Amino acid sequence: MQELELLKKLFDNKLVNTINVLINDKSEGLYLNEVSRLANVPPATTYRIINKLVNLDIIQEIRVKKLKI
């Protein structure tokens, strides 16, 4: 767990919490509100973080009809 603490010191805590939730996800995917709740980050901030990660090709966004996972 020392790596996580180091990342929290180097980067924004909200970013680290969001990435931590995504890395530890064992399901087929999470909705934005689920990531927000699990990371304890506001939905608008989670949306911005996820969009940045998608644009950098770090994570993949899956659309199910009008919903994004």
Image (cartoon, rainbow, N blue to C red):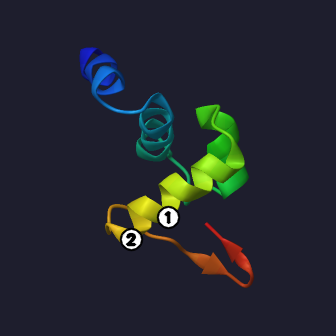
Q: Is residue 3 above or below residue 27?
A: above
The residue indicated by pointer 1 is 51
Location of residue 15 in the rendering, given as x and y in whole percent from the top left corner: 45, 40
Camera-nearest residue between 10 and 40:
10
Is 24 on the left-hand or right-hand side of 5?
right
Q: Residue 7 falls in which quadrant of the image?
A: top left
Instruction: Left or right? Give the position of 34 relative to 16.
Output: right
Q: Identify the secondary structure beneath mark 2.
A: helix
Farthest residue, direction bottom:
65
Q: Is mark 1 on a helix, strand or loop?
A: helix
Q: Is residue 12 left or right of residue 33?
A: left
Residue occupying the point 43% across, 69% down: 60
Name the amino acid, label 2. Answer: Asn
Q: Indicate the quadrant containing the N terminus: top left, top right, bottom left or bottom right.
A: top left
In percent of width and height, residue 19 lies at: 43, 43
Could you tell me if the residues under marks 1 and 2 are in contact, i.e. CB atoms within 8 Å? Answer: yes
Q: Mark 2 points at which residue?
A: 55
